[in-house]
Image (cartoon, helix red, strand yellow):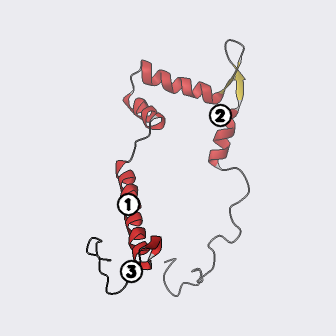
């Protein structure tokens, strides 16, 4: 098939699969942002963005229809989940780095504490 050896259409090593790059024009996200940024005249005669109208429709669906999927979507967008494991990993990593820096300081004799080969301090854990 396309990626098998011997296929004359297979990309050569280091060759781009899209040498011309992406075609010019807006992405879907850019188009949607433009549309949502447009303003129309509301029932009260004031200018209202399509984003505000969409927000009101979604909120009404969540509140009046008690649509669980819509409520869940709103909750996830308004109050993103805090990832506890990432925070604790960062704290543990920071502590390990700090401990390693202190051990390195002691080995190099920084902060006035000279370390010689015959001066073994057992209070410091061995280097790993």
Q: Residues within 10 Å of mark 3 (few under 14, many from 20)?
A: some
Residue sitting at x 25%, y 75%: 122
In the rendered image, which residue does mark 1 sit on? 95
Is the residue 88 above or below the residue 4 in the image?
above
Q: Which quadrant of the rendered structure holds the C terminus?
A: bottom left
- Whether 71 is drawn above or below 86: the answer is above
Q: Are the two marked residues, 1 and 3, in contact with CB atoms closer than 8 angstroms?
A: no
- Asked if the residue at tag 3 contacts the one at tag 2, i.e. Cβ–Cβ closer than 8 Å, the answer is no
In the image, 51: left or right of 45?
left
**Left or right side of 2 for 68:** left
| Front label number (1 vs 2) | 1
Q: Which residue is mark 2?
A: 36
Mark 1 and mark 3: Cα distance apart in space: 23 Å
SS at circle 2: helix
Looking at the image, which is closer to me, 70 or 91?
91
Q: Disc 1 or 3, which lies upstream in sequence?
A: 1
In the image, residue 104 lies at what x, y percent?
Answer: 42, 74
**Tag 1's secondary structure?**
helix
Could you say which is closer to the camera, residue 76 or residue 31?
76
Residue identified by numbered label 3: 115
Nearer to us in this view, 50 or 123:
123
Could you tell me which residue is drawn at 48 percent across and 82 percent down? 4
**Nearer to me, 5 or 95:** 95
Point out the tag, 1 or 2, that comes first from the N-terminus. 2
Identity of the residue furthest to the top in this view: 44
Dot 3 falls on a residue whose secondary structure is: loop
Residue 109 occupies which quadrant of the picture? bottom left
Instruction: Classify 2 as above or below 72.
Output: below
Marks 2/3: CA–CA distance: 66 Å
């Amino acid at each position: 098939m396309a990626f098998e050896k011997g296929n004359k259409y297979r990309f050569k090593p280091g060759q781009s699969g899209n040498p011309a790059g992406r075609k010019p024009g807006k992405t879907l996200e850019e188009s949607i942002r433009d549309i949502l940024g447009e303003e129309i005249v509301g029932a009260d005669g004031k200018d209202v963005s399509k984003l505000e109208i969409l927000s009101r429709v979604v909120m009404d669906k969540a509140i009046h229809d008690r649509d669980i999927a819509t409520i869940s979507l709103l909750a996830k967008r308004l109050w993103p989940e805090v990832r506890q494991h990432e925070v604790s990993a960062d704290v543990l990593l920071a502590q390990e780095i700090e401990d390693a820096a202190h051990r390195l300081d002691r080995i190099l004799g920084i902060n006035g504490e000279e370390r010689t080969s015959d001066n073994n301090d057992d209070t410091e854990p061995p280097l790993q």
